[in-house]
Image (cartoon, coloured by chain):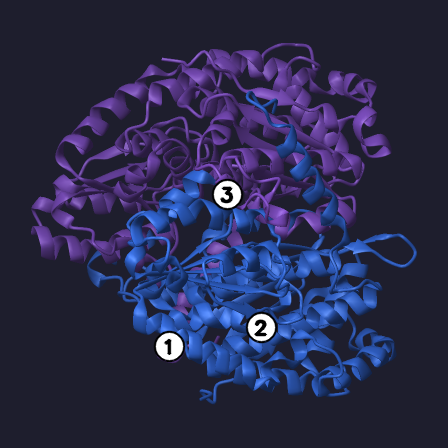
Chain colours: A blue, B purple
Amino acid sequence: MTSGNRLIIDDTNFFTEAVGDHGLEQSDLEALSPRLDGLRERLKGWRQGSEPTFFHLPFEPDHLQTVYEWGQRITAGFQRLVVLGMGGSSLGGEMLVQCLGGSEALSNVLFIDNVDPVGIEETLQGVAWDDTMVLAISKSGNTAETLAQLLTLLPHMERALGARVVRDHLLAITEDEDGALARVARSFQAPVLPHPPVGGRYSVLSPVGLLPAYAAGIDVEAVVAGAAHMAEKCLEADITTNPALRGGGAQYLLAEQGKSQTILMPYFERLNKVGSWFRQLWAESLGKLDAEGRHRGLTPARALGATDQHSQLQLYLQGPADKTFTLFIADEMVYCGDRIPARFKEVGAVASLAGHSLGELLAAEFMATRETLTRNGRPNRTIRMPALDGSVLGELIMLLEVETVVVAELLGVDPFDQPAVEESKVLTREYLAQMEGRINL
Amino acid sequence: MTSGNRLIIDDTNFFTEAVGDHGLEQSDLEALSPRLDGLRERLKGWRQGSEPTFFHLPFEPDHLQTVYEWGQRITAGFQRLVVLGMGGSSLGGEMLVQCLGGSEALSNVLFIDNVDPVGIEETLQGVAWDDTMVLAISKSGNTAETLAQLLTLLPHMERALGARVVRDHLLAITEDEDGALARVARSFQAPVLPHPPVGGRYSVLSPVGLLPAYAAGIDVEAVVAGAAHMAEKCLEADITTNPALRGGGAQYLLAEQGKSQTILMPYFERLNKVGSWFRQLWAESLGKLDAEGRHRGLTPARALGATDQHSQLQLYLQGPADKTFTLFIADEMVYCGDRIPARFKEVGAVASLAGHSLGELLAAEFMATRETLTRNGRPNRTIRMPALDGSVLGELIMLLEVETVVVAELLGVDPFDQPAVEESKVLTREYLAQMEGRINL
């Protein structure tokens, strides 16, 4: 099931030997270690299922059974899956499908994660309802946008299918059986599956992320096995060898030195959505008040190699030293793409390109960016995926989740809540209620 | 040609009256004014064409003539335009086409702005070379990625079209007639158009951005007219009424107070690429060393409403107070989209949604986010587009360009160079030269 390939993390360039004063000393990391004792114990408990957490999801076979059962019904009966959801209800599945699904999967499994009327219309262009399944996901069951997505699609589905048939084309995932999503689904006699008792941004290794992935033809068992393998590694006591204690600890220490922006920069477009998923995980888990009422948090940002070398690299190298960088590469990127023909090799700037593949150029650009960041004292690490398969992606998902929890522990914040966004949800409903006729923007 | 609609900028929430200590005093802005006297004079000279700058582009009718001449040839002879370019050679055109082009234009005008082999293959799926024109853009004429894109496409074109016909399907834009791009194009007897003598990230109002826009059916004359209108407004002396002096000055002052991250958050997916274009403009123009060798710069980031309320809003509200926000809205977003049917209005959370359109929900979410940011002391402004048309977008482009120059002036950096990225370009060629057989990532 697993490829035998494993994630390779190289954080050499986080340390002073590589980046001078902007880096860490190995001893700083070791000194941090005792502050993680409490978390070490909690991780052990989570591994045993002491309380429901993302950390235990890969060890719960029920999730895979649900995914197989419903996934087989979907793939047997439908050409297309439309996933409705916001934030954590959507981003995990989107990441899995974009990284591992291939272009056919991308057009067969569609995600609607906004209420933009034009965007939704474009996404649904060409969707034939009679071979389409709609999967609506909301942990609370009361997410305004997800309800709005579903309620505006339903009349189209009913017109195309007839009211009674809608039940065979609709599936809901929610935690609250009395929430609005469950009630709407049940009114059509459509099935409602339970959302695991973890926050949306930590739900990717449950049916929330794995069911869309299965529908896209992805080996979900490999994803789970990779995550389980990484979870076991994250139980090691030694901060220098436990990848999440080490990675989270290093990023915390660098943030304390003023490098509070975390740039995720993959050099392979298929990995681009890892940044979107991580960006929610990192922002919502860390950006909040600590016990002393201080505003804490690290700001995530996405970049894309090689494109953003022509957009952000100038700032990264000579702007304020307020960032750390995680570069992602997949070995297979090097070995694909057309070769640049030799026939123009006499033409100045072409000389050094001729004979090389596009993938080799992309790899050379990655190596040059890594080296230039390092020479300019910008702490960076590389996460290398020897194969871009489910097992390696599963490892990466678990690593980034546990690193997030490690940084939260060190910042003194709760990684699992999001107390600030409630106010905006209440206000949205108030503004809607006030809207009569002309709207005063 | 212009719609009569004009951009509306509301920066009330940048000031202390709205956001308390985190905001500005009107007097801070007035005190800044004398530091912009030199720039005021330069802007006047630029308006007269004293030296080639972006500021004069809307007043150069030659550009529109070139765009009409070549644009008509392209649209008369071809179904599809493929634009090859990196950074500023691509982002301006991408922005215009995404904002104004509609979904048919998006599939007829394609942009390749990376050397990712899988990404390029996916972009070109279904492209028939016999009705496709390729437009390759590189200011220097020696951009490695653009040359690699073109040189790997050429064999496909030659196979499909025959070597002699390629010349009718290829058009280059470059400043250096002896550069590699011009030499490759000329070897096929393909035409080479001049790149204006301004940096790529300031080139959108020349054929670099306008020719792809024309091919997408966009009213380019309106874009230019809107930009010209805004340029004239940016010549006003008074910092409180000149929109760019005011906007740039305010963002500089807020950055000096520690708010050095600039978040662009449109509430309309069609406006999403404005963030990608702005992000290069802001990062490459401002992120550099000043005369004293200090690392200066403001970090841009993209967000998307309402999606990122479920991803970044928690961090924006309770994380470190290190950000300012520019929210974009277009009036038309409110008046489109299906209405949420009333029939489920008894179902708890649906009650407040029933009867409203998706656009109204999106508008309510924008209003709620603006209010919540303000209540939490997070400086924000709103840029409102009464119509999403060429004229209003032209205004926005010029505003953001001049604001960038204003902030550069105050930081004491040159907005038009990008000295740091050369090292990485040299290293890329070195690593490529060393690649023989197995590659050591």
Give the SS element for disc 2.
helix
Residue A7: image x %, image y %? 54, 80
Disc 2 from disc 3: Cα separation: 41 Å
Residue shown at the point (32%, 27%) measured from the top left? B218
The amino acid marked with disc number 3 is Arg
Residue B235: image x %, image y %? 58, 12
Q: In the image, which is nearer the foreground, mark 1 or mark 3?
A: 3
According to the picture, the residue beneath numbered tag 3 turns out to be: B343
Chain for mark 3?
B
Chain for mark 2?
A
Give the quarter of the image for residue B219.
Answer: top left
Q: Choose between A434 and B345: the one closer to the eye.
A: B345
The amino acid marked with disc number 1 is Gln
Residue A246: image x %, image y %? 72, 76
Q: Is residue B258 visible?
A: yes
Disc 1 from disc 3: Cα separation: 33 Å
Q: Choose between A84 and B30: the one closer to the eye.
A: A84
Give the SS element for disc 3.
helix
- State which tag comes first along the sequence, 1 or 2: 1
Number of residues whose C-alpha sits closer than 10 Å to that of mark 2, classed few (under 14), some (14–19) or many (20 or more): many
The amino acid marked with disc number 2 is Ile
In the displayed structure, does residue A376 sit left or right of residue A331?
right
Q: In the image, which is nearer the foreground, mark 2 or mark 3?
A: 3
Residue shown at the point (76%, 63%) measured from the top left? A254
In the displayed structure, does residue B357 sit left or right of residue A156?
right
Q: In the image, which is nearer the foreground, mark 1 or mark 2?
A: 1
**Residue A397, numbered circle:** 2
**Outermost residue, right side:** A292
Q: Choose between A214 and B208: the one closer to the eye.
A: A214
According to the picture, the residue beneath numbered tag 1 turns out to be: A72
Q: Choose between B174 and A152: the one closer to the eye.
A: A152
Residue shown at the point (70%, 67%) measured from the top left? A404
